Image: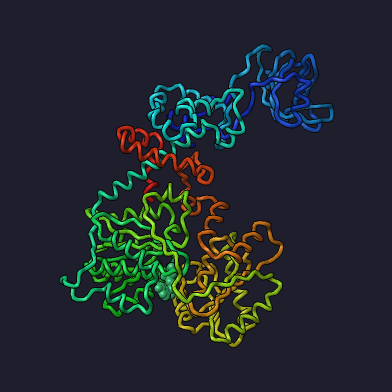
Amino acid sequence: MTTNRPPTLLQKMGLDSPMALALHLPSRYEDETRLYKLEEALNRGKLTSVQTQGLVIRSQVIFRPRRQLLVTIEDETAVLQLRFLNFYPSQQKQMAVGAHLRVRGDVRDGYQGPEMVHPTVKAIAQDAPLPTSLTPVYPASAGVSQATIRKAVCQALCDPVIKENLVEFLPTKLMEQLAPSANWPDLQSAITYLHLPPADADTQALLDRTHPAWRRVQFEELLAQQISLKRAHTIRRQRKAPAFEVKSTKGKLKVSIEKGLLKALPFTLTKAQQRVWVEIGDDLSRVYPMNRLLQGDVGSGKTVVAALAAARVMDYGYQAVVMAPTEILAEQHFLKMKEWFHPLGIEVAWLSGSLKSKEKKLAQDAIESGSAQLIVGTHALIQESVKFAKLGLAVIDEQHRFGVRQRLEIQQRIGMELFYCHQLMMSATPIPRTLAMTYYADLDVSVIDELPPGRKPIVTKVIKASRRDEVISGLQDWLSKGLQAYWVCPLIEESEVLQLQTAVDSFEQLKLALPNFKIGLVHGRLKGEEKASVMADFKSNKIQLLVATTVIEVGVDVPNAALMVIEHAERFGYAQIHQLRGRVGRGSADSVCILMYSEPLSLAARERLQTLREISDGFVIAERDLSLRGPGELLGSKQSGDAMLRFVDLQRDVWLIELAKKAAELLLVEHADLIERHLDRWLGSRAEFLKA
Ligand code: ADP
Ligand code: MG
């Protein structure tokens, strides 16, 4: 028997309270409410599993070809053989001649006629009543039997705690107003229904999770999420942050860094940049912390906007920090910031994990003393040992690439005791609407929807790898014109070593083929300073062709490099290629991206390459990407392993999100008293993750 297993296994599955058990909903059901006569069962059982019963007329253990138990049952219509390759003596006893068995399984044609192999067996009285509800099948981990879970869930559902916990909070009026025709059951009925649906339930709707009972539960879950997001929003507005208004020229300030930067820029801001700068500047002038995402396709010019924000903060004697998820990206920012701010007399500090401890100490001291006004680096910046003298602004580039945990750490690190600093996130990956409404609801969004003038659209070509020689000779012509190029090596997800190897191979091959040009190689295994020196050489045109792994995926900015060849492009995802090719098309030259692919090409890969050739709009590409991969990757939940919405599918249930949003607004205004209880029962300890 399995019912006496230690409870710790259930607890390991997180099923440690009646509420957790009640919310552990079945993934599917088995129909044990129907019983077929043997003759009919023999026919139906070939298509799907069936339940039937009969009297045991023979039970024997045979030893050829191996030890097994054969049991034959019959009723007035037919005979069926049951075969068990593993069995306990107790089972053998249970199925002795004369016993009545109710069995369930698939029927197949055996040597001696129709048989069921390892059916589910119950010895019962012939007229034992059938269950009136479908039998739930629960998600389970190894070693936990369905019977154990069923029993525990059943007990939980009868627990008075549950009755109290699942009490209907939502005013009937509210539901009628929001979803007049939805006809949802109340929460407790919905949950009971999902655990034990009646025999005639719409099983397809249950499986698809579109049944009204599912809807009711999904709605509750979304409601909890919406409420907590709204609360986070309110809490943020109650926090204090230093307010940075535009300094009037009459102020005490002699030289404004912001004005100095604007004057020194070799270009004027685009309309879109000006607009988002007004939005961000406005946030910075508030007494509560900014929480804004600056979104703009690759190359749209987000960095300069971040620099302006940093300048404003520094004008008030505060520090600004710019963080990026990779060393290369952070390095690029550092160089750019130094180029812009050094002439204005600003000390820009660099902090990354790869610094030697002495250099690190120096940087940390400068940050702590406040002599470093602008600090650029990787997530080494969020380590405990870094203390800011007076932090006013944190810019986090490509923030979705930081994992959820890291994002939480960032949040905690920059939340000071008295003051919270302003936060500006930047990303080239647009947040699809469903995510914007859920996980990112407390985020204000500014969009740069225009590229700087003079940009030529990138021409994307899709070319078979067998034409590699042609591609290389085209590359030679290209380099001969004094232009630079990238050669991106294939992504090999299974092995970093293999990936490095192919990069080295391509590098050697290109060196032989293009002897008149300097070629550099950059990959993830290089030390920080080695990487930096290759990148610097490429930037200053000492290197004409840069062979690289995907380390250059984000943020690298070399306008003279306008050709990119991507090897084995079929192995990359939408977003990766879009990010990669965003490295070209930054200067005034015509830009080309060559996607080389090898046969055979899967249908999905073919479609992906074609889409990428035709579409350059990052928003469209991101939507396609999301519909393929689901939101996990954008959210970084891959890293955390913690999906917050358990019952909701963001793509399927958009309308439900809208509904929950409205309900949350109404509840907050009219039934604030219910909110704590609602959050408690749904989120419990997971509430923390909403802040990331
Ligand atoms: P991204 O949004 O991808 O981070 P960057 O900030 O790196 O883009 O900008 C891409 C390039 O465009 C940089 O070389 C930057 O100096 C340049 N740039 C930014 N704004 C303008 C502008 N208004 N006019 C001309 N060039 C600009
Ligand atoms: Mg950038």
In the displayed structure, 93 sits above or below 110; it is above
Q: Can residue 83 be seen in the rendering of this structure?
A: yes
Most extreme residue toward the right, as rendered?
112
Q: Is residue 497 left or right of residue 162?
A: right
Give the colour scheme of this rendering. rainbow
The residue that appears at 47% across and 81% down in the rendered structure is 537
Q: In this view, does 641 lie to the left or right of 459?
A: left
The residue that appears at 39% across and 57% down in the rendered structure is 445
In this rendered view, identify the residue nearer to me: 462 or 121. 462
Query: To which quarter of the image does residue 80 belong?
Result: top right
Q: Is residue 482 left or right of residue 339?
A: right
Measured from the top left, where is residue 152 in percent x and y? Answer: 50, 26
In the displayed structure, 498 sits above or below 177; it is below
In this rendered view, identify the residue nearer to me: 11 or 642. 642
The residue that appears at 56% across and 60% down in the rendered structure is 574
Q: Quadrant of the N terminus?
A: top right
Measured from the top left, where is residue 412 in percent x and y? Answer: 32, 53
Query: To which quarter of the image does residue 77 belong?
Result: top right
Q: How many labels does the image show?
A: 0
Measured from the top left, where is residue 215 in percent x and y? Answer: 50, 34
Query: To which quarter of the image does residue 499 belong?
Result: bottom right
Measured from the top left, where is residue 44 in percent x and y? Answer: 75, 27
Q: Can residue 498 be seen in the rendering of this structure?
A: no
In this rendered view, identify the residue nearer to me: 454 or 232. 454
